[in-house]
Image (cartoon, coloured by chain):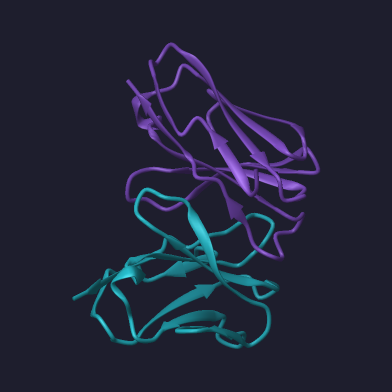
Chain colours: A cyan, B purple
Amino acid sequence: RKEVEQDPGPFNVPEGATVAFNCTYSNSASQSFFWYRQDCRKEPKLLMSVYSSGNEDGRFTAQLNRASQYISLLIRDSKLSDSATYLCNTGRRALTFGSGTRLQVQP
Amino acid sequence: ETGVTQTPRHLVMGMTNKKSLKCEQHLGHNAMYWYKQSAKKPLELMFVYSLEERVENNSVPSRFSPECPNSSHLFLHLHTLQPEDSALYLCASSNSDGYYGYTFGSGTRLTVV
């Protein structure tokens, strides 16, 4: 089993929709979790950090479920500019990234 | 300069050439990383340096040779590459255990001809 697994998508949603992605992880000792956004042919950029149960920043909410070992990212009121690949990471020393979930927001 | 800076941004090299990629971080981090990302593929961790000591080498071919002279600089020396090595090479840095996340450079887009 991979350390971090994500649904690759793509998720095609209309503008204004709410969309959620999940990321499962295998190492129960992980202490910090991150969502990154990666635009086409660009570097990943840190979007949200999760250290306890969850975190909210505007339209974005990240939740951690330790019992089931997954983190989720919820995007409300999707914008065209949210179209990107979203990567999750468990923040371990080995820098384990999921393969990413591609989101395409359509007009 | 702030953040993580990578040079060059683009590089085209022949299979017999020798070149080096450079990464510099201005964040006070003490761990640095090299990643490879081929077209439409996930990030592949290549090397990890913590406190200037290589702590991870993910079965990378010897034609890739990293160097970390200090905690702010990281190099990737390239020689006799293959066309399949064409990819985006990303450098990242973090504090020693990555607890606060990772900061990436803009990458070097490498084409081997």
Residue pictured at 53% horizontal, 80% vertical: A70
Residue closer to the observer: A7 or B87: B87
Residue closer to the observer: A17 or B84: A17
Q: Is residue B59 visible?
A: no
Q: Quadrant of residue B70?
A: top right
Q: Find residue A103 and report its horizontal and vertical position in percent.
A: 31, 70
Farthest front residue in view: B1
When the figure is inspected, residue A2 is found, relative to residue A31, above or below; the finding is above
Q: Find residue A18 and report its horizontal and vertical position in percent.
A: 34, 87
For the C terminus of chain B, which image quadrant?
Answer: top left
Q: Find residue B89 and report its horizontal and vertical position in percent.
A: 48, 39
Residue pictured at 50% horizontal, 63% vertical: A2
Residue B34 lies left or right of residue A103; in this view the side is: right
Residue pictured at 25% horizontal, 81% vertical: A15
When the figure is inspected, residue B33 is found, relative to residue A63, above or below; the finding is above
For the N terminus of chain B, which image quadrant?
Answer: top right
Residue closer to the observer: A81 or B78: A81
Q: Is residue B69 visible?
A: yes
Farthest top residue in view: B16
Residue B73 lies left or right of residue B5; in this view the side is: right
Q: Find residue B98 and report its horizontal and vertical position in percent.
A: 70, 60
Farthest right residue in view: B51
Farthest left residue in view: A107
Residue pictured at 29% horizontal, 86% vertical: A17
